[in-house]
Every structure is written in C-alpha cells, then in structure tokens.
Image (cartoon, rainbow, N blue to C red):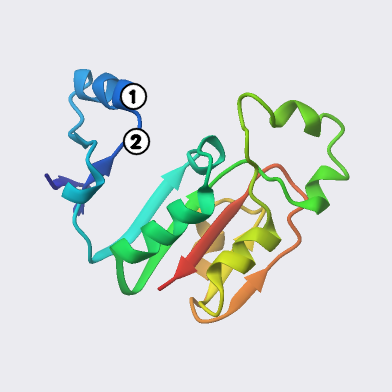
C-alpha cells in the first residue's frame, strides 16, 4: 500500500516480521511480502540494513529490479572500505555480531557493473545531489559514513 509522504508515494518493506510489527504499532504501513511491493519505482532506499543480511549482493540486485530506468538504488551503511579500516582505531568494534557484513567501495563497483554509481564517505544528501548520475564515481571512503547510489 502506497502512502503519501511529503509529496512522495512511499511503499515500506521490512524483512523482519518483528520490526514490521513494531512499525505497524507506530502507525506505519509496512509490507513484509516482497512479492507484494511492486516495481517501477523512482528510487529504492535502505538505511543501515544491508550490513545485517547474509547476502547484500543479492539484495542490491533485487532492489535494482524494482527501479525503473533512470531510477536509483541508494543506501547508507557502515563503511567497510580499506581507506576507513586502516585509519579507524576502533574499526574492529563496528563489525562482527552486530554488523556481520560490511560493504566496501570495491564491492559496490563490482555489483554496479557498468551502471553509473556513486560511492562516498560524504553521506550527506547534498553529495548525492551533486552527482551527475551518469558517471562511475568512487571517492576515497576514509570516514565512517558510507553512501552509495546505483543508477538503473
């Protein structure tokens, strides 16, 4: 069920039945069956989700199938890139039981294949807005933030 939020029609999907039930208690309409979500979206967004699932590549590929041509798959996750790992003194505390998988700049480049993409540690919306959406941009990911976008 799509709801209008700030002028956007939004469909929410949650993989966890427990979290979906919690969201529904707060009045959020959340779909738990991916086959009922639909497709042809302008964008699919996830925030601090992909690092908790066993196969983020498959999840991103699935997200790409839900987006119409010219649309975006956008996500925020903790940064697992080498540039950040080598300079963060407590990096080992950010992965493991809580974050079993950490995504990297090279991983996103591989998943995006020939599609335009942006990978950056500048996870502010303004950085995404400055991307031309036609280039493959892999910035040094040396800070804790990790933002990626892949254009379909």
Q: For the point 79% across and 34% down, which residue is it?
A: 91
Residue 106 on image: x %, y %: 70, 62
What's the distance in space between the residues labelled 1 and 2, CA to CA?
Answer: 8 Å
Query: Relative to 90, is 94 on the left or the right?
Result: left
- Please determine whether, in this image, residue 59 is positioned above or below residue 134: above
Query: Relative to 143, is 76 on the left or the right?
Result: left
Residue 126: which disc? none
- Please determine whether, in this image, residue 147 is positioned above or below residue 116: above
| SS under mark 1 | helix
| SS under mark 2 | loop
Residue beneath label 1, please? 19
- Please determine whether, in this image, residue 119 is positioned above or below residue 32: below
Q: For the point 23% across and 20% down, which residue is it?
A: 26
Q: For the point 74% across and 46% down, which residue is it?
A: 143
Residue beneath label 2, please? 15
Quadrant in which residue 18 is drawn: top left
- The quadrant in which the C terminus is found is bottom left
């Amino acid at each position: 069920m799509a709801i209008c939020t700030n002028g956007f029609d939004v469909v929410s999907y949650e993989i966890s039945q427990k979290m979906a039930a919690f969201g529904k208690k707060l009045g959020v309409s959340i779909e738990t069956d991916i086959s009922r979500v639909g497709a042809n979206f302008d964008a699919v967004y996830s925030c601090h989700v992909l690092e908790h699932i066993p196969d983020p590549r498959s999840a991103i590929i699935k997200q790409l199938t839900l987006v119409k041509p010219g649309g975006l798959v956008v996500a925020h996750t903790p940064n697992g890139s080498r540039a950040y790992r080598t300079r963060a003194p407590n990096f080992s505390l950010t992965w493991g039981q809580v974050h079993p998988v950490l995504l990297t700049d090279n991983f996103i480049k591989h998943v995006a294949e020939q599609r335009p993409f942006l990978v950056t540690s500048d996870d502010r919306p303004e950085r995404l807005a400055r991307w031309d959406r036609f280039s493959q941009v892999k910035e040094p990911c040396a800070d804790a933030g990790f933002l990626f976008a892949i254009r379909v």
